[in-house]
Image (spheres, rainbow, N blue to C red):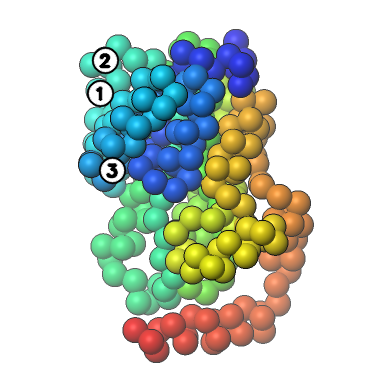
Amino acid sequence: MALSTETLRGRLAVVTGAGRGIGLCFCHALAERGCNLVMISNQRDEIADNAALISEKYGVQARPFYCDLTSADASGSILSFMDSLGLETDILINNAGVFSFAPLMETSEARINCFVDLHVRAVTCLTRDFGRRMAERKHGYILNMSSMSCWMPMPGIALYAATKSYIRVLTRAFHYEMRDSGVKVMAACPGGIATDLFGLPPRLMKLAVKLGVIQTPEKFAGKAIDKLLKGRMQYINGWLNRISIFFVAITPTPLRMMIKHRMLDKNIKRI
């Protein structure tokens, strides 16, 4: 049975990276619609406090689960936790992510492993493992968080853009693989979102939201959930972001090099 905002009450959603930012906004948006939650984060105290707050505010069951998604057995650990409580998942939101602005040559092996483990392996395993269970029940929704940067091979965000591109391609392919099973799979590719992920000063962030250049995470999360429940394959927030994809694709090399020299190289010299 297809879900809607009205039929989320009593259902269960699993959200990764749920302790703050967009992940926490997803949790609030789902709980507001009556959906129970398993909130996953590698910040133990933060996730426990937020789960308690959401449970009290919305009258739903919000269970915190501490997990390092870069560990090899992360997906198995989450499923074991679900099984121990007899829980079945209606919605999976793979939101957890990391970001850094640095040239690949200056990126440590540990940081590279973090990007690959979190954006590639964890998303892949969780999508497969939860997708398999959903397919057996012929019901479920999976939202994987990509990014507008998946179309932006710009200097300084090579790892972020490449791994987010992987998420988008994986999700779109899995959407078709699961189409006959009753499981809906969607890639969300947000443009600028007003969180602390990119380190934008609060004053500039408020101005950008006011001008419509970036979107609040609350608004994005609500709309992304609505698109997921409608069975969309991909969601890009805002007409400006959708149009910009074309211009990013044809960005000339001199402009890319100007970005490198004026932004990336300058930041490296400050370090």
Q: Nearer the viewer, residue 23 or 261?
A: 23
Tags 1 and 2 in contact by the CB under 8 Å rule?
A: yes
Spatial CA span between label 1 and label 3: 19 Å
In the picture shown, does residue 36 fall above or below 112?
above
Which residue is at a point 58% across and 50% down the rendered structure image? Answer: 216
In the picture shown, does residue 160 fall above or below 176?
below
Which residue is at a point 47% across and 26% down the rendered structure image? Answer: 31
Residue at the spot of label 3: 46
Identify the element where label 2 is drawn: loop
Which residue is at a point 45% across and 29% down the rendered structure image? Answer: 92
Q: Which circle marks residue 271 in the picture?
A: none
Which circle's residue, 1 or 3, is located before the other in the chain? Answer: 3
Other-residue count near label 2 (Cα within 10 Å), few / some / many at <14 / 14–19 / ≥20? few
Find residue 27 and report its horizontal and vertical position in percent: 45, 33
Find residue 165 and report its horizontal and vertical position in percent: 54, 53
Spatial CA span between label 2 and label 3: 22 Å
Spatial CA span between label 1 and label 2: 7 Å
Q: Which circle marks residue 85 in the picture?
A: 2
Q: Which circle marks residue 81 in the picture?
A: 1
| Quadrant housing residue 176 | top right
Find residue 213 and report its horizontal and vertical position in percent: 67, 61
Three-letter code, disc 3: Glu
Other-residue count near label 1 (Cα within 10 Å), few / some / many at <14 / 14–19 / ≥20? some
Three-letter code, disc 1: Phe
- Looking at the image, residue 187 sits to the left or right of residue 28; the answer is right
* Residue 208 in sight in this render: yes
Which circle's residue, 2 or 3, is located before the other in the chain? Answer: 3
Figure quadrant of the N terminus: top right
- Looking at the image, residue 37 sits to the left or right of residue 247; the answer is left
Which residue is at a point 47% across and 87% down the rendered structure image? Answer: 266
